[in-house]
Amino acid sequence: MSRERTKPATVTDVARLAGVSPGTVSKALNGRGQLAAATRERVMSAARELGFNPNLVARGLVSGRTYLVGVLTTDTIGRFTIPLLTGAEDVLGPGQMSMLLCESRGDPIREQHYIRSLLNRRVDGVIVTGRNSDVRPSLGAEVPIPVIYALVQSDDPRDTSVLHDDREGAAVAVRHLVETGRRRIAHVTGPGRHAAVKRRLLGVEDALRAEGVSLIDEPMYGEWSEAWGREAAFRLDRGGKEFDGVFCASDQIARGLVDGLREAGRQVPEEVGVVGMDNWDAMAEAARPPLTTVDLNLSGLGRTAAELLVAMINGRPIETGHHLVPSSLVKRRSTELS
Amino acid sequence: MSRERTKPATVTDVARLAGVSPGTVSKALNGRGQLAAATRERVMSAARELGFNPNLVARGLVSGRTYLVGVLTTDTIGRFTIPLLTGAEDVLGPGQMSMLLCESRGDPIREQHYIRSLLNRRVDGVIVTGRNSDVRPSLGAEVPIPVIYALVQSDDPRDTSVLHDDREGAAVAVRHLVETGRRRIAHVTGPGRHAAVKRRLLGVEDALRAEGVSLIDEPMYGEWSEAWGREAAFRLDRGGKEFDGVFCASDQIARGLVDGLREAGRQVPEEVGVVGMDNWDAMAEAARPPLTTVDLNLSGLGRTAAELLVAMINGRPIETGHHLVPSSLVKRRSTELS
DNA sequence: TTGAAAGCGCTAACAT
DNA sequence: ATGTTAGCGCTTTCAA
C-alpha cells in the first residue's frame, strides 16, 4: 500500500511530521522568510516522505492568482488555432500556467457565459482568438483582467492584438516570384471582403512597385477552395494574357491552380512559378509539384501572444495596438529554378 | 463609473446589503435550506445590485469539486482531436465544466508534469487522448480520480476507453461498394503495424465474407499519404488483375488513388468505385470526384467520453473496457451509380 | 529563527 | 427561518 493513495497530504501534515508549524512549512517550501538550513531540510524531507503537493485551489484563493489563462475562440477550434495553442503552451507551460479552453462557436450568448465563467474562476488573463483576422468587438471594461487578442484584432486601440503579417507575407511571396525570374504576375485570392485579402493585396502591390512591374490583371477574387484555384487556372489559360508567375492567397487555391495549370499543359515551375500561403502541409506537400508557400508562423504568434499576456499579468508595461509576427517563405518545387 | 469595476462583491457584501448573514446568502443563492420567500428575494436583489458572482476558487476549496476536467493529449492537438474536443465541450459546457488543455507531445516527462499539475489543481476528472488508436499505458493508480481514454486505449482493462469502430466502419465501406455493384475489390491501407490498420482489415474481411467474395489481392500497405494512393493506383492499373472497387483506409490515400486512376484513364465511379475513410472535408470534397467516405464520428466520440466521465465523477457506475462509437457512411460522387 | 493567528470566499453543521 | 461557527489548505503578518 503506497501512502499516496489516501487523502493528499497538507501543509499541516508536513508540519506535524517535521515538528514545525504550518507557516514554517510554507516558508520552507517556497523559499521565503528566514529559516535555519536544518529546519528547511527537515521540512523538505518530510514533504518528500508524505508525497506532499500543494493544493493549487487553496493557494489560488489566498494569493488571488490561479496561474490559469482562458482561451476564448470566437468560432471553433480550427486548423489555424492549433499551432497557435501549441505556441502559447510553449510559453505558459514552463511557468506552470494552464489553458482553459472555451469555444464560443460564434454565439455571443455563449461567449458571455464563458467570460463570466472565466472571471468567476479568477483566471489570470485571457487570450481571445478565432479563425479570421477581421476586426472583432473588444471585450472592453467588462473584463477587468489582462486580455490579448491573437489572430483576431480588437476594435479598441487600447487593446493589444497580435497578428500575422499578411502584407509583408504577400510581399515576400511576390518578391520570390520576381527573384526567380517572373515578371508577368497574377494574383488569385479569396473573397474581397476579407480583411486578410485586402492586406495581402497591399503586400502584392508593395512588392511589385518596388520591382517596377505590376499585376498583369485585376486580382482574381473567389472562394478559399481548390475548385476556385482550378477555375482560376482555366481563366488564366484562356485569358489571352501572358503570365509566368501566380501568387495565390491560400494553399488550397494554389493547389487547385497547379492542378489546373498542369491539365492545361502549362509546366510548373518551368513556365509558371506558383506561390501559396499558409504552409498547410497536407496541401502544400501533396500538391504536384509541392508548393512554395508563405508560413504565417502561427505558433510564433501564439508564443508572442502568451508572452505579452504573461507580461501584462506580471504588471510589466506592454505596447498596446498591433503586434505583427513576421512570416517566412518555405521553398518547394513550385517555384524552383531548373 | 459602474460598480463592477472595483473588487468583486463577496457573499459578505451581499449579506450586509441584504441585512442577513453570509450563510443565508449562500442558501438563498444556491436554493438550499429553508428560507422565507421574502428573504430570498431580498438577497437575490442585493446580489443583482452588487453584480455578485460566486468565486469559484473558494467554492472549489470547500466543496472539493472544481468543475474542471483535464484533457491530456499524448501528441499535439491535431485534426482528429479537434472534433473530439468540440464534442466533449458540448457535454461539459452546459454543466458549467471547463476543459484544461495539456499537450504532452509524446514526452513522458512532460506528461508526468501535467498529471501532477492537474491533480494539484484538483480537477474532477481527466480525458486522455492522442493521435492514434494504438494501446497506451494506463495512468493507473497514480491518478486517483476518474479517467476516460478517448481515441486512444488504455492497456489496463479496468480503465474505460471510448473508441471509434474501425472494424465496423471498414465493413460499412465495403458493403457499400458491394451494394453499388462492385465485386472485385482491392484494399489500399496504411502501415501494417498500426492497430487501426489491422482492425480495418478485419472489417473488410467481415463484409466480404458475408457477401461471399474476397479481396482480389493482398491488402496494399503503405504510408498515410496521397503519394501512396497515387502509387497504389499505378500498381493496380498495371497489376493485371481486374478491379472495380477500392476501399482506402484514409481520405488522403483515397484522394491520391482517384487522381492516379483518372490519370491512368480509369473512370471513377463508372468503372471503379472508391471509398475513403475519415471524412476529412478538405480532402474528400476537393477530390475529383468528391469522395464517398466513412465518418468516424469523432465529435460523438468526444461526447460519449465526456458523458462517461461526468457519470464517473457523479459516482454513477459505468462499464469499464471498450466503448465503440458507430461510424457512418457519407456518400459522395466516387461511388455514385450513374 | 520560528510559532501563532488571521484571513482568502464560500459552505455546512449546528444553534437559536 | 435565520444566525453563528468552524473549516477547506494555504500564505502572511506579527509576536515571541
Image: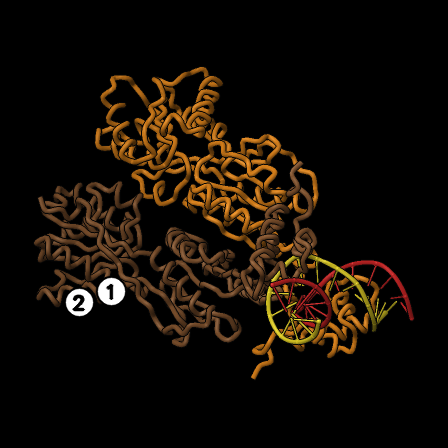
Chain colours: A orange, B brown, C yellow, D red
> Which residue sits at x=42%, y=28%?
A197
Q: Dot 1: what SS?
A: helix
Picture coordinates of residue A120 (x, y %)?
59, 52
Taking A64 as reference, is B6 above or below it?
A: above
> Which residue sits at x=25%, y=19%?
A239
Q: Which amino acid does label 1 sit on?
A: Arg
On what subunit does the disc labeled 2 rest? B
Picture coordinates of residue B187 (x, y %)?
19, 58
Picture coordinates of residue A204 (x, y %)?
44, 23
Q: Are marks 2 and 1 on the same chain?
A: yes
> Which residue sits at x=38%, y=55%?
B87
Which badge, 2 or 1, is on the more N-terminal residue?
1
Q: What residue type is labelled 2?
A: Asp
Image quadrant occupied by the C terminus of chain A: top left
Q: Nearer the viewer, residue B335 or B260?
A: B335
Numbered mark located on residue B167 in the image: 1
Disc 2 marks which residue?
B206
On what subunit does the disc labeled 1 rest? B
Residue B184: image quadrant is: bottom left
Q: Do the residues labelled 2 and 1 touch (CB within 8 Å)?
A: yes
Residue A270: image quadrant is: top left
Question: For the residues marked 2 and 1, what is the alpha-carbon distance in whole angstroms?
Answer: 8 Å
